[in-house]
Amino acid sequence: MMLVERGASENTIEAYSRDLKRFAVKANRAEFGPLDVTTNFIREYLAHFSNEGFSSSTQARHISTLRQFFGFLVEEKIRSDDPTILVDTPKRNYHLPKLLTEAEVRMIIGYCSGDQTPKGLRTSVIIEILYASGLRVSELVSLTLDVISRGEEYIRVRGKGGVERIVPINGSTRDALKKWLLVRKKFIPNGESSKFLFPSVKSRVGHLSRESVSFILKKAALASGIDPARVSPHVFRHAFASHLLANDADLRVVQQMLGHADISTTQIYTHVLENRLRSVVVNYHPLAEQKD
């Protein structure tokens, strides 16, 4: 159901599977089956994570897993009630993401643009796309050739839950794409073909892995004189959002381009707006002119 109806990713399904197996072990020891698990037992089970010092996000994920599972049992009329309805979800503590400055991103892009080898062109276009579009690395590696077939002004991305969104890309990224497409076939054995923008014969799924992209970015950062520990695909996603907001982009627009279903997720980036918002209040609020 998660795969076919919800369009969940392999990573999500694997995480849910691990969570459910862990829950099943505890439930079996308490002699509970799927049909007679109680709300109190679920609360006690989840309290264990809190007592052991697990983060609120980990606790929230386990609750989400159980809600999906018992909701499924109710929908399929396997069970008449959902024991998770009265279980509270802990408030998540959102941490500010690691950031690269605009100057640091330019340093990496500038260094990579000097490498015109096939691998260098691949590195350049990967960084350009990540920074220009804010894609998740899972979205990047699964891009197919048809998403850039119409003038390459937009990328059609299938994100979480199979939801498709359109993300515009700038001229610099389009130029990097054109150069990459000229050498892309060098990464495909003779006589074979691939639908993926970033093919890989070493991968069982036919495209670059997320780990490979992370390694490529760290290697580029090191060569650019930037600590590779500060660089990852997600850091470029954070840089995309933060730099847009710092340059007066609308929060709702950034939310849409990131593919966030809830704007509260996008709001972790609003820390970059603090100085600008303070300036607006000082300069434009009528009471700001009053002296103490």
Image: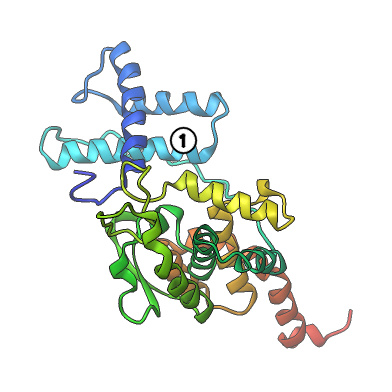
Please give the name of the residue rendered at 45% of the width and 57% of the height, measured from the top-left corner.
Answer: 136
What is the residue that sits farthest to the left in this orientation?
A: 77
Please give the name of the residue rendered at 28% of the width and 25% of the height, measured from the top-left corner.
Answer: 38
Q: In which quarter of the image is residue 3?
A: top left
Q: Mark 1 points at which residue?
A: 59
Q: Which of 88 and 179 is in front in this view?
A: 179
Query: Is residue 165 positioned above or below 67 on the image?
Result: below
Query: Is residue 157 positioned above or below 29 on the image?
Result: below
Q: Is residue 4 visible?
A: yes
Q: Where is residue 154 in the image (x, y as percent from the top left)?
A: 38, 76
What is the residue that sits farthest to the right in this orientation?
A: 292
Q: Quadrant of the N terminus?
A: top left
Q: Nearer the viewer, residue 24 or 2?
A: 2
Q: Is mark 1 on a helix, strand or loop?
A: helix
The kind of residue tagged 1 is: Gln
Q: In which quarter of the image is residue 77?
A: top left
Q: In which quarter of the image is residue 282?
A: bottom right
Q: Can residue 97 be seen in this view?
A: no
Query: Is residue 81 positioned above or below 51 on the image?
Result: below
Q: Where is residue 227 in the image (x, y as percent from the top left)?
A: 72, 50
Color scheme of the displayed model? rainbow
Please give the name of the residue rendered at 25% of the width and 17% of the height, measured from the top-left corner.
Answer: 32
Query: Is residue 60 positioned above or below 127 on the image?
Result: above
Q: Tell me the crowding category of disc 1: few under 14, some 14 to 19, or many 20 or more residues within 10 angstroms, Cα based.
A: many
Q: Nearer the viewer, residue 194 or 134?
A: 194
